[in-house]
Amino acid sequence: MTRALWFTAPRTAELREEAVREPEAGEVQVQALCSLVSAGTEMNVYRGQVGSAAEVALPTVAGEFPFPIKYGYQVVGRVVVAGDASGYETGDRVFCQHPHQERFTVDARVPIVFPLPPAVPVLTAAFSSLYRTALNCLLDVPVRVGECVAVSGLGVVGSFCAHLARKTAGKLLLIDPAPRRRELAAWIGADAVVAPDEAPAAVAELSDGRGMDVIIEASGAPAALQAALRSIATEGTIAAVAWYGTREVPLVLTPEFHFRRPRIISSWVGMIGSGQQARWTPERQRAVALAGVGEIDVERLVTQRFAFADAPQAYELIDQHPEETLGVVLDYEEG
């Protein structure tokens, strides 16, 4: 028997006991070491703000949509039993797109289980999926040398997007309503870090009145996309990497959208962007993301660690006090 985290009703998480079956030839049984909560996608599921089961479709998802549902996708663990045809050995460390669960059996032949090099720390691996989301965004909307860039929303994905944009941006503006998150973003080295009501003046100053060449909307706040339209330069690009769930995102398009001719690009990590498929594969993305996140001290992104037994409290905290959280990690005792 093992314990798994389930969402049983809107804003309700609980641990349930369930049996773990022995792996077949192509499967592995994994003991979780740590897992990372997604403050975007997972919290939409937790709050009941998902429109259809297709939006959260993963082979490891269990239950009934919308509730009760077992959902998550960022678990780092160690193989404790390996099937003969799994390609793994006992003791191998892996990243799994699996819900938060102490021990589980999963098919190792489908792309939801990935081997980890011995030198990669467990915590670094836990953040690699969200780094890949940011990497995919910057592949969808590259930042040219010298461009003025704004990132709205300094969660983990937004912070990683800002870190990648900093490599080539001429001016970088970071926007978030939470003072704690603005403080934690100091490591990125932005030219300005401001609250949303301060953003228009900062945009005007950093861009010499032109507006931003690129704006990455990573907050998930519907009002932030409207604010991006007001701050974008003529023929600039807005990358929407946040997932809004079922929340309505009303936009007033006149006059900025018509007169400035900006592009709004959807960036979803589950799809390689147009024109890139010949060169970028999911395997290449994962490898680049793992190497990239390995260059960052991810400990500075962790604001809370919870024992897995207290996991429901982690979701309650993120839901009620998002301004106090950034990276929320669940720790497991190795069995």
Image: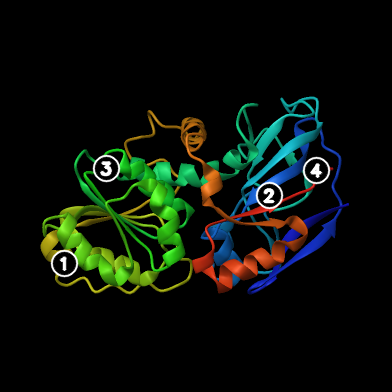
Mark 2 surroundings: few (<14), some (14-19) or many (≥20) residues within 10 A: some
Is any part of residue 306 visible from this angle? yes
x%, y% of residue 275?
A: 32, 36
Amino acid carrying label 1: it is Glu
Which of disc 4 and disc 2 is earlier in sequence? 2
Asked whether the beta carbons under mark 3 and mark 4 sit within 8 Å of each other, the answer is: no
Which of disc 4 and disc 1 is earlier in sequence? 1
Which of disc 3 and disc 2 is earlier in sequence? 2
- Helix, strand or loop for disc 2: loop
- Helix, strand or loop for disc 1: helix
Asked whether the beta carbons under mark 2 and mark 4 sit within 8 Å of each other, the answer is: no
| Residue 15 marker | none
Mark 4 surroundings: few (<14), some (14-19) or many (≥20) residues within 10 A: few
Give the CA separation, mark 1 to mark 4: 55 Å
x%, y% of residue 27?
A: 76, 35
Kindly identify which residue carries mark 1: 256
Residue 139 against residue 172 in the figure, above or below: above
User: Depth check: 328 or 17 in front?
Assistant: 328
Give the CA separation, mark 1 to mark 3: 22 Å
Amino acid carrying label 3: it is Val
Q: Nearer the viewer, mark 2 or mark 1?
A: 1
User: Depth check: 87 or 120 in front?
Assistant: 120
Q: Nearer the viewer, mark 1 or mark 3?
A: 3
| Residue 60 marker | 2
Amino acid carrying label 4: it is Glu
Kindly identify which residue carries mark 4: 334
